[in-house]
Image (cartoon, grey):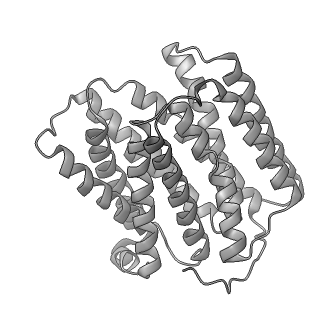
Amino acid sequence: MIPTNVSVDISPRRAYAMILMLIGSIIISFGGLAIRNIEMADNWQINFYRSISFGLAILIVLLFRYGKRGHQKLTGIGLQGVLAAVLLGGASISFLLAITNTTVAATTFTLSSIPFLTAIMAWLFLGERIGKSTVITMVIAGVGISLMFVQGLGSGTFYGNFMAFLCALGFSYYTIIIRRNRGLEMLPTLILSNLIIMLIALIFTWDDLLISWNDLLLCFVLGGLLSATVNTLFIIAAKHLFAAELTLFMLLEFTLGPIWVWIFVNEVPTGWTLIGGSIVILAVLLKSASELRKVKI
């Protein structure tokens, strides 16, 4: 269990952290577009090559930032860092099992519970109590997500929906650990989590690793560029934002993803998707603008 004797401080760099999360959420929202353009690779192949490029990118960041001291950071995350890596790796695998056993709508709707689960955990384990404006933003964004995927919630399987819930639960707990250990360099947890994902994916696809150059490039973009960037920004922002606020920005990813696919692949979203997405974007942007007016970057 995570210790509860945590001092709850309000960072003067909250606006800076919110800008990082906005940038990260916009970047990772292109992930769906990248996956949509993959031609033949299956889910396990995608995760195998994505995890390799993701882990290597974080390793390069560590070496660039710390040089010869990089290996000290790798071994300095402690047991809580290892637990965080296991949780993140498990959440990623659960997402894979969810998306292949239930609808995208049901999966995304379940994942939209992450800010709410994180808020409860942060209150229990960290003593973080979020303000009324954040609660209102979460509720409004939750309504927007519900409208986006209302037409696809009736289908899917219990197993797939349960895996989606495990993904949400695992990522929320991972966020709590990262926030709890914000004084440490937690980037190495990303390397370890991707090693876990790579090994598990290898079990299922060891005899079929050959994919096209197009798919390999997109897997490397998905892992080494998009995922590595957003997760690095997430860990940096965790030093300055409350746990629930960190995950609130993730809703932008769910909202913007269908828009990019619409623009670049001509996959037209439903009217409810556009209405709900607009509500989410407006809620998060208003929250960010409010914070930008109150504090200095």
Q: Report whether 76 appears left or right of 206.
A: right
| In this view, 11 is above or below 144 | below
Identify which residue is drawn at 40% across, 64% down. 64
Identify which residue is drawn at 60% across, 75% down. 180
| In this view, 208 is above or below 128 | above
Q: Report whether 37 appears left or right of 283.
A: left
Q: Which quadrant does the C terminus fall into?
A: bottom right
Identify which residue is drawn at 62% across, 53% down. 114
Given residues 194 and 126, the one toward you in this image is 126
- x, y percent for residue 33: 47, 28
- Residue 11 seen in render: yes
Q: Report whether 197 appears left or right of 118.
A: left
Q: Which residue ends up furthest to the bottom in the rendered image?
A: 5
- x, y percent for residue 135: 82, 54
- Determine the image quadrant of residue 223: top left
Q: Which quadrant does the N terminus fall into?
A: bottom right
Q: How many marks?
A: 0
Given residues 38 and 199, the one toward you in this image is 199
- x, y percent for residue 255: 64, 33
- x, y percent for residue 8: 75, 78
- Residue 20 seen in render: no
Q: Which residue ends up furthest to the front in the rendered image?
A: 158
| In this view, 103 is above or below 128 | above
